[in-house]
Image (cartoon, rainbow, N blue to C red):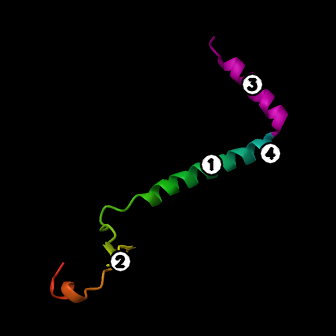
Amino acid sequence: MVVGPMQLLLILLIVILIFGTKKLRNIGQDLGGAVRGFKDGLKDGEAPAGTPPPQIAARDDGTVIEGEAREKTGDDAGKSA
C-alpha cells in the first residue's frame, strides 16, 4: 500500500482541522526546542580537542578527588609528576 501525495494532503488537512494551526505551531516549537536541547546536551558531553583531561587523584584514605591537584606531602614532596 503506497501513500501518494493526495492522501498525504488529505491527512494534513484533517490534522489541521482537528488541532488548529496555533496548536500545531506550538507543537512544532516545542519539538524544535527539544531537539535543540538534545543537541546542546550532546555538545556539552564532548570535551574540546585542545583541553587536557581532568586530573584525578586519590587521597590516602582511598577517596577520589576529581579536578583538584593532589597536594604533595610526605614521600611525594620530593618527586615530580
Q: Amino acid at mark 1?
A: Gly
Quickly name the residue at label 4.
22
* Crowd around label 4: few <14 · some 14–19 · many ≥20 (10 Å): few
Q: Residue at x 20, y 84 (%)?
A: 76
Quickly name the residue at label 1.
32
Q: Amino acid at mark 2?
A: Asp
Circle on res. 41? none
In this image, 6 relative to 80: left or right? right
Q: Residue at x 69, y 23 (%)?
A: 8
* Front position among marks 2 and 4: 2
Quickly name the residue at label 3.
11
How far separated are the C-alphas under marks 3 and 4?
18 Å
Residue 51 is situated, as x and y percent measured from the top left of the image, at 32, 67
Query: Which image quarter: residue 68?
Result: bottom left
Residue 36 is situated, as x and y percent measured from the top left of the image, at 57, 52
Circle on res. 61? 2
Asked if the magenta segment contains residue 18, the reply would be yes
Q: Secondary structure at mark 2?
A: loop
Residues in magenta, as a range = 1-20
| Mark 2 and mark 4 residues within 8 Å of each other at the beta carbon | no
Query: Which image quarter: residue 59?
Result: bottom left
